[in-house]
Image (tube, rainbow, N blue to C red):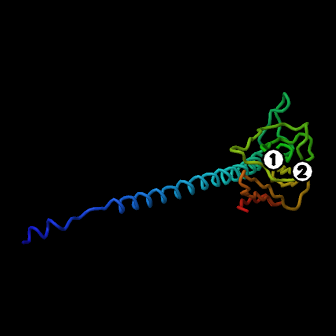
Amino acid sequence: MNQTKYQNNKSGFTLIELIVSIAIIGFVTTIGVVNYRSANKSSVLQLEAYKAATDIRRAQNMALGAIEFNFNPSARVPDAWGVYFDSASADRYIIFADQDNNQIYTSGDGIFAAINLKNNIVLDISGSINISFVPPDPTTYLNGLSGGEVSINLKDQAGNKYEVKVNVLGLIDVNKL
């Protein structure tokens, strides 16, 4: 009698239970893939914002170290090292060596590096922004003035934004907007 009782008690999954389990696993996997892609796009924007902040710090360090620039046949320490952002070229910015002592980027200044923003990240600014560091302190000039604060906004195609702020003390801050 015990043997027939165990034979009638079948354990396992029914077809309905199996289909429901597969559907749940598929749904959870889809949500994970969608979140991964959006997180990846956000991290690319964040990376570009921190890279811009690092390049500003790089110009500041070159001014602090009185790094020479081979603009003319004879190398000399530039009047300032700086970073130039322009809305007309929204997909790049320039690290420059100021050769004419005006603390802003002009055609007579030397270009140390032109940095291209990646993955359709663009500058979201109006006009242009000059950040210059005059050796040896270095003294910070924002748009040719020794005061204030500037903000450089970067955005992606989805409209997400990061802000890179620089103040007159040369402090750099990156924030998500």
SS label for mark 2: loop
**Label for residue 68?**
none
The quarter of the rendered structure image containing the C terminus is: bottom right
Residue 116 screen position, x and y as percent: 74, 41
Q: Please identify the residue farthest to the top as the structure is shown.
A: 73
Residue at the image point whose x is 19% and y is 68% from the top: 9
Q: How many neighbours does mark 1 have within 10 angstroms: few (below 14), some (14-19), or many (20 or more)?
A: many
Give, as a three-letter code, the residue at label 2. Answer: Gly
Which residue is denoted by mark 2 in the rendering? 127
Which residue is denoted by mark 1 in the rendering? 83
The quarter of the rendered structure image containing the N terminus is: bottom left
Which mark is nearer the camera, 1 or 2? Answer: 2
Q: What whole-number distance in Å separates the C-alpha atoms at marks 1 and 2?
A: 14 Å
SS label for mark 1: strand
Q: Are marks 1 and 2 in contact (CB under 8 Å)?
A: no
In the rendered structure, the answer to whether residue 10 lies left or right of residue 105 reads left
Q: Please identify the residue farthest to the left as the structure is shown.
A: 1
Q: Is residue 3 above or below residue 117?
A: below
